[in-house]
Image (cartoon, grey):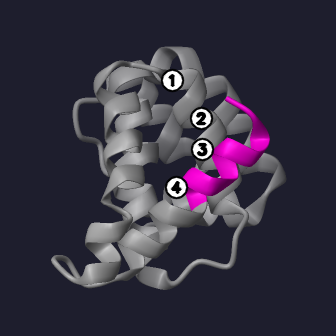
Amino acid sequence: MTETELNEIVDAWVAGESAEQGSPEHQANWWAISEVLNWTLDRNGDLLWRFILAAYKRDLPDKVVGILAAGPVEDLLAKQGEDFIDRVEELARKDPKFNYLLGGVWRNTMTDEVWQRVEGIRNHRW
């Protein structure tokens, strides 16, 4: 997937998640929400991680920040945490905005080790 294609998905995902469920805007952008969900279900962690990196840097509404934390970030750590926790920790140490995002992540089905590392790196909880 090219960066242009990824950015188109991020644009549509943000627009869809910003809109009221069932609204024309939400329905028009459902394809991007569905695509991100499929990456989670298919355990396509590399694409999901690229999506997270592209999305969190944007100036997102609080609602969408919460959805990003409790959705893609939490899902990545719950399903493939062992493979991505090093990257998550490194970015959380370097970037306060990403660390803030971790405040909206719940344990879900993360292993004890992954969850302890998430709790150990984040500066706050929502």
Instruction: Please give the residue where the numbered disc 1 appears in the rendered image.
Output: 45
Q: Earlier in the sequence, mark 4 or mark 3?
A: 3
Task: Give the quarter of the figure containing the N terminus.
Answer: top right
Q: Determine whether the residue tagged by mark 2 lies in a helix, strand or loop.
A: helix
Q: Is residue 7 above or below residue 11?
A: above
Q: Determine whether the residue tagged by mark 1 lies in a helix, strand or loop.
A: helix
Q: Which residues are magenta?
A: 1-10
Q: Determine whether the residue tagged by mark 3 lies in a helix, strand or loop.
A: helix
Tell me how far mark 2 sits from mark 3, CA to CA: 5 Å
The reply to whether callout 4 and callout 1 are in contact (CB within 8 Å) is: no
Q: Determine whether the residue tagged by mark 4 lies in a helix, strand or loop.
A: helix
Q: Is residue 105 magenta?
A: no
* Any part of residue 101 in sight: yes
Task: Look at label 3 and name its amino acid.
Answer: Phe
Task: Look at label 2 and name its amino acid.
Answer: Trp
Q: Earlier in the sequence, mark 4 or mark 1?
A: 1
The reply to whether callout 2 and callout 1 are in contact (CB within 8 Å) is: yes
The image quarter containing residue 96 is bottom right
* Any part of residue 105 in sight: no
Instruction: Please give the residue where the numbered disc 4 appears in the rendered image.
Output: 102
Q: Is residue 43 above or below residue 71?
A: above
Instruction: Please give the residue where the numbered disc 2 appears in the rendered image.
Output: 49
